[in-house]
Amino acid sequence: MDLSYFWTGWAPIWHTLLIGIVGYLTLVILLRGTGPRTMAKMTSLDFVIAVSLGSVFGRVVTAEKVSLAQAVVALVLLVVVQWVLAFARARWRLMRRILDSPPVLLYYAGQLQHGALRKHRLTEVDVHTAARQSAHGSLAGVQAVVLHQDGSLGVIGEDSMGDGSSLLPFIERHRGDEAPHSTQHGG
């Protein structure tokens, strides 16, 4: 048996320690600098950056032929790309349309939106679960259930609906989408 499976000397150990510590501290500083939004519930853009950062960090910690400078540049690059895309998303509607998934109305005014449920691979049970989790024993008294950008389900009670201005664009789009083939059943 080749002993290099167990020990190849101190150099790889020191390399891993150095890259691991400096890489970890770099990530903490970068993520702290991006603000709490990065650490909140994730949109698809946030998820991609989180997975990418984790993958790069895991790779550079164990790769012997990656220098400290290259590891830091790789981590900084991913965070800079995130900042640029977040900046563009905040400034231009086209970027929001490309990068964001708009909220989706799953239940409104006593009607399940079966097309939206199917499209997003959700069920009536998911809507009822969201209602229960928001302290509603049934859908009675619930005005709307919305699939948010981060994948969570939000429940709006009839008493909390107000003028509905935060839902109006989605209600109008829903009416436009459903008008030609409006169905009240799950068929």
Image (cartoon, helix red, strand yellow):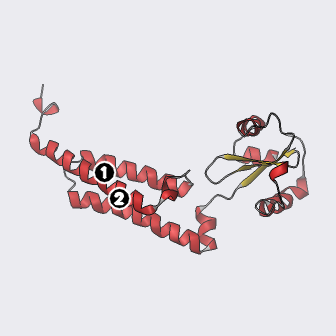
Question: Could you say whether the residue bearing mark 1 is in a helix, strand or loop?
Answer: helix
| Left or right of residue 93, residue 115 in this image | right
Of marks 2 and 1, which one's residue comes earlier in the chain?
1
Q: Residue at x 34, y 52 (%)?
A: 56
Residue 121 is situated, as x and y percent measured from the top left of the image, at 69, 42
For the N terminus, the image quarter is top left
In the rendered view, tell whether residue 153 sits above or below residue 149.
above
Q: Nearer the viewer, residue 128 or 122?
A: 128
Residue type (three-letter) at the residue carrying disc 1? Tyr
Mark 2 Cα shell of 10 Å, populated few (<14), some (14-19), many (≥20): few
Q: Residue at x 51, y 71 (%)?
A: 87
Mark 1 Cα shell of 10 Å, populated few (<14), some (14-19), many (≥20): some
Residue type (three-letter) at the residue carrying disc 2? Ile
Q: Label 1, on which residue?
A: 24
Question: Could you say whether the residue bearing mark 2 is in a helix, strand or loop?
Answer: helix
User: Marks 2 and 1, Cα distance to the nearest angstrom?
Assistant: 9 Å
Q: Nearer the viewer, residue 123 or 147?
A: 147
Q: Label 2, on which residue?
A: 29
Q: Nearer the viewer, residue 171 or 120?
A: 171
